[in-house]
Amino acid sequence: MLSEVFSSYTVFHFIGIGGIGMSALAQLVYSYGYIVQGSDVNINDNTEKLVKKGIIVFVGHHHSYVKDAHVVVYSSAIKSDNVEFCTAVISSKIVLHRVDLLLYFLRLKRVVCIVGSHGKTTTTGLISSILDYAGMDPTVLIGGVANSYNNNIKIGKGDWLIIEVDESDGKMMNISCDVAVITNIDLEHLDYYKSYNAIENAFLKFLKGVSKKGFIVLPDNIGANLLYNISCNKITYGFSSDNYVYAFNIRQEYNLIIFDIMVSFGIQCGLYTNIKLPIIGYHNVKNAAAAISVAIGLGISIKDAIKGVENFLGVQRRFSLLEEIMGIKFIDDYAHHPTEIEASLLSASCIAKGKVIGIIQPHRFTRIKYFFNDFIRVFTKCDYVILTNVYAAGEGEILHFSSNDLINSTKNQGFHNIVLMNTSAEIADFLSIIAQEGDVVIAMGAGNITNIFYDVIQRLKAFYV
């Protein structure tokens, strides 16, 4: 039991508590009656929610902040010379990586883990929506703000815990669960993994930790290494008819996507038509198919699963329509990998009656280095690209891999509708000239682009109204 493990430790301090994963974990610990505090260099929506709950948040980092803490929690984003981390180690406090702390809580529930290079957050939200509709009241930790909870966590009373698992630092290999869902595997986080084989092997090691009484949900394009080297039950899903759950006949309408599925296993096998997914994007049909596959494996009726999908309210910053001004749609999206950007631009083109204008904030110099040519290729999917400076996320600059380098190389490939802008004022002025009724303006990135974009929208509202 948790109380036995931490019986004499009541105060938990989180270094970097404002992060999406850390703030959710802090709330989970708080829900069990512990005293929770933390620090972060920035105040954001996450920290404001924590403070409203009674969690103390210090701004910045200082050795005194960990003075009263019994357990100090850090993430892979915290460097070893962080003053609070060093103080905790020197003071012989219990110092835990966030995943190591999470493991204690995962033992208290039956667990569904969602992993993958892209689509984890939406898939986690869809699975949660299904279990909510089915009356299972799960606890949910999600890598974004779910609109149905207005939070990145929901504390449920049911037996199940649904969690989005970050693969970026390899820590997922330490996690065991009852159900594992893979959305996809792509070249990503190469600063850690170095090669695709290393990424695939990490996923394989994670899957080998799934309970033999559980099951794994896999997409149809997964490598044979994963498909054949795991012993528990497997459910495959995707757009190919040889999957157990096969999505097809996909139709995009104004603000939703409609599709059919064929289920080819179990007592609920059969055809299910006209499923209405209230979010945009062909790729999200695959996420919905993964969620329905989980529901079938858990014994939830497919009719309830479909209702859960159709009731899904989405996740903030996942192709979120913020405003429509003078017939111009303004969409905020988390896409920051070329594969994600391309998928979001495809979705934007499906609803645009005019141009697609991308405001893209590159995220990390290492990502630009590894995917330089891929970024150039996806930029050309836009009619116009407004590029900002790189959001470094703590990295040092890498020579020849800046936003200006991307712009120059893109122009050398023959695409000239690309500019560098960094302030909301200049972006708003530019959009006031080029954007017209029927256009879609989509801001993409994992940094602070959403803050800039909100200000852009306010400026344009003042300009047009």
Image: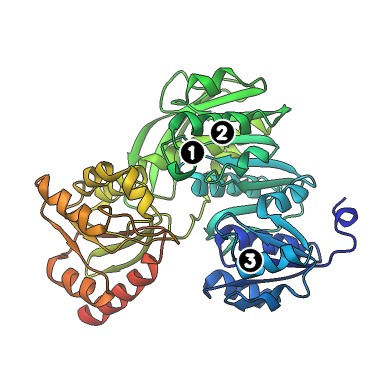
Query: Looking at the image, how many numbered discs can be counted on the residues?
Result: 3
Residue behind mark 2? 202
Residue at position x 21%, y 80% from top?
A: 463
Residue behind mark 3? 15
Tell me if residue 137 can be seen: no
Q: Name the kind of residue labelled 2 in the image.
A: Ala
Q: Going from the N terminus, do you reach mark 3 or mark 2 first?
A: 3
Left or right: 284 in relation to 99: left
Left or right: 412 in relation to 6: left
User: Which quadrant would the C terminus be assigned to in this image?
Assistant: bottom left
Q: Going from the N terminus, do you reach mark 3 or mark 1 first?
A: 3
User: Are there few (<14), some (14-19), or many (20+) residues within 10 Å of tag 1?
Assistant: some
Residue at position x 46%, y 18% from top?
A: 242
Tell me if residue 453 can be seen: yes
For the residues carrying marks 1 and 2, which lies nearer the camera in this image? 1
Residue behind mark 1? 193
Q: Position of residue 265 (x, y in %)?
A: 59, 20
Disc on res. 25: none
Q: Secondary structure at mark 2?
A: helix
Q: Position of residue 319 (x, y in %)?
A: 38, 55
> In the image shown, does 313 or 145 lie closer to the viewer?
145
Residue at position x 22%, y 68% from top?
A: 421
Q: Name the kind of residue labelled 1 in the image.
A: Tyr
